[in-house]
Image (tube, rainbow, N blue to C red):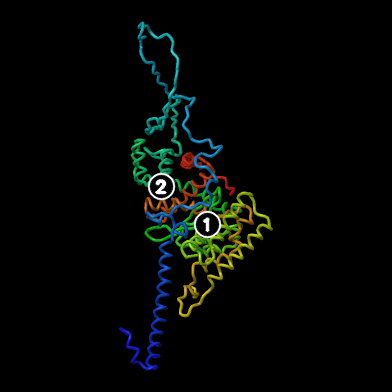
Amino acid sequence: MQSLPDLTHLSHAQKDALIQVLWQQVQALTTQMQEMQKRILHLEARLALNSTNSSKPPSSDGLAKPAPKSLRQSGQRPIGGQSGHKGNTLRQSAQVDHAIAHQGAARCSACQGAPTQHEIIERRQVFELPQLRAHVIEHQLMRWTCSCGQVHQGSFPQDIKAAVQYGPRAKALLVHLNQYHLVPLQRSCALLRDVFGLHLSEASALAFCHQAAKALQPSVDAIGQAVQSAPVVHADETGIRVKGKLAWLHCAVTPRLSWLGVHAKRAGQAFEALGILGGVRSTLVHDGLAGYKGLECKHSLCNAHHLRELSFIHEQMNEKIWDGWAKEMMDLLVQANREVQALGAPLAQQRRAWYASQWDALLERGERYHPYVTPEGAPRGTQGRHKQSKAHNLLRRLRQYRDDVWRFMSDEGVPFTNNLAEQALRMAKVRQKVSGCFRTREGADVFFTIRSYLATMHKQRACLFECLISAFKGQPVQPCLLG
């Protein structure tokens, strides 16, 4: 209908027919507008996702990084050095390696007399590195003949196998730079050449890494077994590129132990093949991946993920019209965590019951605004269920796994978040950004074997350089295996 007809010439029946046509058009346009509004809201929500309100990594934020959010209240701790902190201020040393005296004039300007008495009136010290050059040690095989005619000959130490080779300190430094500090092989070799005069090839550097991994493998196997028996274990996974294909880096860590391993699968088969997480029988802290939930142990869900999801609902889904239940949930979780931190122990039963009642009330409020819906003709997910809103899915998980969400409040030593595992994976992603994918599966295994050992020893405040030197000498420092 291009234009409205002259109503004065229409009969009642024609007017009724016209109204019917217009009504149908209005209904169709209304339905179309509603669908477009839903799509707009969906697309705006996707654009608003970032590292602060979802599980997206900070690297995906690009240049428009959102302002960081902290659970710490303003003024809770002053900026700068804290009370009792020793600091790292450069101070003069009592031990001086080289002293230079500046006495001024050699003769008195008044009488031209020679100096008779010297005294130091001020000291200034310069901390400098010595000239760094490789130290060449020559092993000479000797032979001597006794007066009786018997010939005697010495033997080289077991680790001296070639006419020219690199020592354990040179090997340890290369592995330290490449495997821990993530300096690519080419630049690691260039650094050793410029600083020490060592002309090391990339092939030799790669061989050193393989040698280190072989020496450290028994220690890493022991770390993996010790992690499984710890009272609280953190687990997480992230995608990495191996031979140009997607693989999964798995970690199982405690405050004192770190174990990392690579597998082609994300869960199930990976846990069985790697032989680590399947043996955990205590409490496993994770992000809620379905594969973890099938493990026979207690579970604790990462509340940092819940806070981000609740933040998204509150900020991006016009939560004001839904009476602010998501914001109150965030505040309740943060309040409980602060109370546990202040107490330094799980909360009493009565206090936990109060938090449970508040939590259930908020869940009911949220479910009133985000009920389960089965719209006619709505698309179904991979498991045959109707697709639900993010808010509904979150509410369902928070109710279904309520005990796991609040495990930090009831069990000794269970943390509020899974940050420990996420931190263990972070440097692997940095390595991938620096050097790209792993060219071989063997190279990936070498890197994560060495990384597991060094991350563990770092947690235990050991000197990583000295640990690597010992490994190349065939006597690696063994970590403390108490989680």
Q: Is residue 358 above or below residue 164?
A: below
Checking the image for residue 304, the label placed there is 1
Which of the pair 90/236 is nearer the observer? 90
Question: Does the image show residue 80?
Answer: yes
2 vs 1, front mark: 1
Q: How many marks?
A: 2
Q: To which quarter of the image does residue 407 belong? A: bottom right
Q: Residue furthest left?
A: 2
Residue type marked 1: Ala
Q: Is residue 29 above or below residue 69?
A: below
Image location of residue 73, percent across then percent down = 54, 49
Residue in the image at 47% along x and 75% along y:
380
Quick one: label 1, few (<14), some, or many (20+) residues within 10 Å?
Answer: many
SS label for mark 2: loop
Which of the pair 364/408 is nearer the observer? 364
Checking the image for residue 182, the label placed there is 2
Question: Does the image show residue 277?
Answer: no
Q: Relative to residue 138, is residue 479 drawn left or right?
A: right
Query: Sequence-wise, which precedes: disc 2 or disc 1?
Result: 2
Image location of residue 389, percent across then percent down = 49, 69
Which of the pair 465/125 is nearer the observer? 125
Q: To which quarter of the image does residue 192 belong? A: top left
Q: Is residue 468 above or below residue 443?
A: above
Image location of residue 287, percent across then percent down = 52, 60
Which of the pair 147/212 is nearer the observer? 212
Dot 2 and dot 1 residues touching (CB under 8 Å): no
Image location of residue 248, percent across then percent down = 45, 59
Q: Is residue 335 above or below residue 5?
A: above
Checking the image for residue 338, the label placed there is none
